[in-house]
């Protein structure tokens, strides 16, 4: 709001009756322009709209071609024909573009008062890219670098304009030369009173040279004669450059850069003051990566899918596309995991809780929290094995009850006497084995006793 008030005051535009603004769909700016400059024509950048269009999943060469042809269409009928093709491909894509109000991003609905048919704010984006390094610096240094850049550019552009020995700007002349090559395919039919009909197959347009208008509206919107107007001008042996709007004359270009930015003395020429000088704050490194982007209002991130530091935006799950949770806490995945666990195959001798019949889970830990390895390392350990069948069968469990003393245990399991540090380490940090590893170790102890 404050920015719009200062802008209207500086350029003396009142309620913006003859002003045209192109923005990037910034919500705060759109509301401010609507309130402070109700008569202003407010356009939205088509490039930003197309970027959001792709984020919705409408990608591909055909979507891209149809969108830009619809955005650059100068008549309502042409715009509707391209939109019908988009609706044929995807109804959701068509509805998404209609919700973005085509009056703000399509040439067919632009007002011709500004003689500007731009559908994107490329000039401001180029300026932002130029001052990107200055934006990282403190406010005074940033403004000083921007002032020096603008002052130098104003001078260079003024010198460039003085070197042109033509009536219109070079870029406009190139556009006219290109259309002169294309006009030879159009048929010219005179009518009288400065009105003519230009035709190519089923395309027919009425050209009025006196009012500088054409049925395609391209001449009226841009201030540059269209291919239909050039066909009529050349048929009458006229000069197309004479019909270009005054805004594209080299004289007008020089007037834009007539008033330079005045230079100022540096800090070494500042007058002395009686009070103590203001020192900059102590520089200290803040945690995390240094911030480059500006601080945004919490309401600007309403469309984000992640929770920001302000906590204003709502997360969205990438699995069910619902708000309020992420993929890790998705209720659909949680139900699916529970169903998978319930239908799982339970191993023989192991319950669904992972606890075997002898009270030891799959990680080798008993129900009271004592690891299997601790029980093996302790001296005078009794291992009870019950034998239900005669003989030893490889596929069956061996249950034989035996008592092993400390000497036999050390001879079968470990061939060196552990020191105090090793015993202390095993007591406090047990090593857990799986149920398969424990069974293999029991077989190994049993064979050692038999030998």
Image: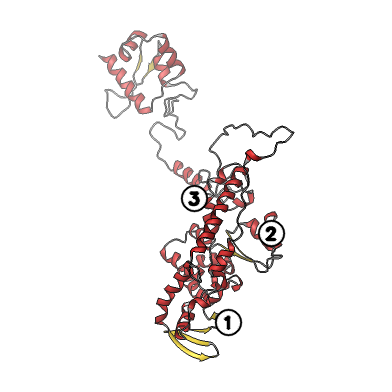
Where residue 276 appears, as percent x and y from the top left, is: 71, 32
In what quadrant of the picture does the C terminus appear? top left
Q: Give the number of the mark in front: 1 or 3.
A: 1
Q: Give the structural element (helix, strand or loop) at label 1.
A: loop
If the image is split into quadrants, where does the N terminus sit?
bottom right
Number of residues whose C-alpha sits closer than 10 Å to that of mark 3, classed few (under 14), some (14–19) or many (20 or more): few
Q: Secondary structure at mark 3?
A: loop
**Residue 355 appears left or right of 113:** left
Question: What residue is at 64 percent from the left and 60 percent from the top?
Answer: 30
Q: Residue at x 28, y 15 (%)?
A: 448
Query: What SS does tag 2 mark?
Result: helix
Q: Nearer the viewer, mark 2 or mark 3?
A: 2
| Residue wearing tag 1 | 211
Q: Earlier in the sequence, mark 1 or mark 3?
A: 1
Q: Which residue is mark 2?
A: 10
186 versus 93 height, above or below = below
What's the CA distance linking mark 2 and mark 1?
A: 33 Å
Which residue is painted at 58% across and 60% down in the image? 257
The foreground one among 395 and 376 is 376
Residue 189 can be seen in this image = yes
Q: Kindly tell me whether residue 75 is visible in this rendering.
A: no
In x, y percent, where is residue 330? 52, 46
Q: Residue extending furthest bottom?
A: 192
Residue 343 quadrant: top left
Residue pointed to by mark 3: 319
Q: Earlier in the sequence, mark 2 or mark 3?
A: 2
* Outermost residue toward the left in this view: 451
Density class for disc 2 (Cα within 10 Å; few <14, some 14-19, many ≥20) is few
C-alpha distance separating marks 2 and 3: 51 Å
360 horizontally vs 7: left or right: left
Q: Position of residue 212 (x, y in %)?
A: 55, 80
């Amino acid at each position: 709001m404050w920015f719009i008030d200062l802008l209207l005051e500086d350029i003396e535009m009142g309620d913006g009756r003859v002003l045209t603004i192109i923005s990037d769909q910034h919500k705060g700016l759109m509301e401010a322009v609507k309130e402070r400059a109700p008569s202003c024509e407010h356009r939205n950048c088509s490039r930003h709209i197309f970027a959001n269009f792709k984020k919705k999943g409408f990608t591909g060469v055909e979507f891209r071609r149809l969108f830009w042809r619809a955005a650059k269409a100068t008549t309502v009928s042409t715009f509707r024909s391209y939109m019908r093709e988009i609706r044929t491909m995807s109804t959701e894509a068509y509805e998404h573009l209609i919700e973005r109000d085509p009056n703000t991003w399509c040439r067919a609905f632009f007002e011709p008062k500004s003689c500007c048919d731009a559908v994107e704010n490329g000039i401001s984006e180029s300026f932002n890219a130029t001052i990107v390094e200055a934006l990282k610096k403190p406010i005074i240094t940033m403004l000083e670098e921007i002032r020096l850049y603008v002052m130098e550019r104003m001078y260079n552009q003024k010198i460039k304009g003085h070197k042109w020995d033509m009536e219109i700007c070079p870029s406009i002349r190139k556009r006219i030369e290109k259309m002169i090559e294309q006009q030879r395919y159009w048929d010219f039919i005179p009518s009288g009173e400065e009105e003519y009909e230009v035709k190519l197959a089923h395309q027919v347009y009425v050209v009025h040279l006196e009012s500088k208008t054409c049925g395609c509206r391209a001449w009226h919107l841009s201030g540059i004669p269209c291919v239909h107007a050039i066909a009529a001008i050349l048929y009458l042996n006229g000069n197309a450059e004479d019909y270009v709007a005054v805004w594209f004359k080299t004289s007008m270009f020089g007037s834009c850069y007539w008033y330079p930015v005045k230079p100022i003395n540096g800090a070494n020429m500042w007058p002395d003051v009686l009070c103590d000088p203001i020192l900059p704050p102590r520089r200290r490194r803040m945690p995390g990566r240094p911030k480059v982007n500006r601080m945004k209002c919490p309401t600007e991130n309403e469309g984000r899918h992640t929770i920001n530091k302000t906590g204003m935006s709502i997360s969205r799950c990438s699995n069910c596309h619902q708000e309020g949770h992420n993929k890790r806490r998705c209720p659909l995945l949680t139900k699916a995991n529970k169903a998978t666990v319930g239908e799982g195959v339970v191993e023989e001798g192991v319950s669904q809780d992972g606890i075997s019949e002898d009270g030891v889970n799959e990680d080798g830990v008993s129900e009271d929290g004592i690891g299997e390895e601790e029980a093996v390392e302790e001296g005078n350990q009794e291992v009870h094995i019950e034998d239900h069948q005669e003989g030893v069968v490889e596929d069956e469990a061996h249950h034989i009850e035996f008592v092993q003393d400390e000497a036999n245990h050390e001879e079968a399991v470990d061939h060196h006497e552990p020191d105090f540090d090793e015993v202390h380490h095993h007591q406090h940090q047990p090593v857990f084995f799986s149920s398969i590893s424990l069974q293999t170790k029991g077989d190994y102890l049993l064979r050692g006793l038999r030998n």
